[in-house]
Image: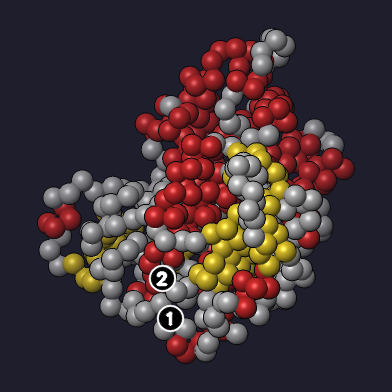
Amino acid sequence: MSETNSLSSLGDFSETLVPVSNRSKIARINIRTGARVTFVHPFSPAHDAGIQAGWTLVLWRGNVPASGLGLTGPCNPLNNTFFADLNGNYFEWKADFWPFGIKISPAIEGKLLGKISKLELNQEIMLDYWRNNDLGAFTAMHAALKNGIKQEFKSTFWEKITGRSKKVDLTEVKTDFVLGFLALAEYQSGNIEEAQKVLDAAEVIREKKHHLSNATYDVGLWFYVQALIYVDTGKMEQAKQAAQNAYDLVPKVLPVRDLMSTFHGGTQFEEIDPLVGKKIPFDYKLPDADPIKPEKTDYNNFMLSDALSKTNDDQIFALLVLGPYRANYYGNIDLLRLASVHRAFPDLISGVHIVVSGTRVADDESRVWFENTCKTLGLEFTILYDEDDKIMPQLPGLGSPQRVLLSNQGIVLSRKEFADESGIWEAYENLVKA
């Protein structure tokens, strides 16, 4: 494909953003505030339409976009998605799907901090604050965040964290991802000892539950805060190693890169993936055996090279490698975002292989819902069982999932995440420039 007709396979979106002259059309509706477009991916429909970073998302209907992402599920805005530009002019998105290619970061709603069960709605926003180096936000939310967690995790949990009790079983806690944010908030508020206690509790939960924390950002955040604490307590060798571990997991997170630069004479660390632009260094032949459904006995073997041979020049093939997980939070939303893009652009993604080597499932009810929703949206995906775990070790980096988007020649187009669309549009950009 040539760059001059880069969007031809997706369509022309240059006239899908329509100026709105009658503001009362918007004013009569309950307008949501605080949502900002923080990034517009090149080569995306939103970019083609003219949406820019800094614009305000003033209203949407249909499924509410997930905090910090855009959406994590099927969305039918019914032609009622409005933006305001930097000059206060209003525009309506007139395509029949969410404007793919934008990333939004709403402000965290204080009322959601009251219940930890609602905090998952804000997880991506907190990740945005961290990724974009807005660490002051964690100081501001410290009290509300701590109060919300206390309400959910019972007083005995805090007795364990603060060392007043050694008998509390921390495995009663369903998930520990939010503790990383709390540890950062404690650190930013100057409570170094409390931050360390929270990190220790998170580590205990992770080891006992084998839960969501193996996801890349959760563990990366843990190492980052641990490195900061090591620096403050004069343990520089341990700090350097923890910072390196965080960088290996989340190299695009700005404060992690800044921390790494302090250990390397101010050298600016950039996110460079050694596989992007090169041919994937392996093939595989794996059975479509779902390890959590042993009742199936008639397996078919699938090869990556065969799947790529059926991929057209203007298509992308997706590989999602979960390692010991059969499903986890980030893998679920990565898959669902692929399905959402597929729903809007059914010819873009030629297929999806999900390679697993274990049976861990963070939340089986969520897994079923996500996978069924993806099938409803028409996305075909195949679960492949890598019993000897040979694929994950061949991919640089740590954590689950590992993402790979490929051309039909086996060239790695992107390894960024699918959930915020960064991998999808980087892959598309590299494809059309090839």
Instruction: Classify residue 377 by image quadrant.
Output: bottom left
Q: Is residue 319 left or right of residue 366?
A: right
Please state which amino acid type lies under the numbered disc 2. Answer: Phe
Q: Residue at x 52, y 25 (%)?
A: 149
User: Where is residue 24 drawn, in percent x and y?
Assistant: 12, 56
Q: Provide the secondary structure element on which disc 1 rests.
A: loop
User: What amino acid is labelled 1 in the image?
Assistant: Ser
Q: Residues within 10 Å of mark 1 (few under 14, many from 20)?
A: some
* Element marked by disc 2: loop
- Colour convention of the picture: secondary structure
Does the CB distance between marks 2 and 1 fall below 8 Å?
Answer: yes
Q: Residues within 10 Å of mark 2 (few under 14, many from 20)?
A: few
Give the residue at mark 1.
9
- Say which of 369 and 429 sits in front: 369
> Is residue 67 positioned above or below 346 on the image?
above
Q: Residue at x 29, y 57 (%)?
A: 76
Q: Nearer the viewer, residue 375 or 288?
A: 288
Residue under the point 72% across and 76% down? 278
**Is 238 or 112 nearer to us in this picture?**
112
* Number of numbered discs visible in the structure rendering: 2
The residue wearing badge 2 is 345
Q: Based on the displayed image, in which of its 4 quarters is residue 115 positioned? A: top left
Query: Could one spot residue 134 in this view of the protein?
Result: no
Q: Position of residue 147 (x, y in %)?
A: 49, 23
Vertical side of 203 occupied by 61: above or below: below
Question: Which disc is residue 246 wearing?
Answer: none
Q: Position of residue 161 (x, y in %)?
A: 66, 19
- Residue beneath the point at 44% across and 49% down: 372
> The C terminus is located in which quarter?
bottom right
Q: Which numbered disc, 2 or 1, marks the residue that appears first in the sequence?
A: 1
- Residue 399: percent from left, percent from top: 70, 49
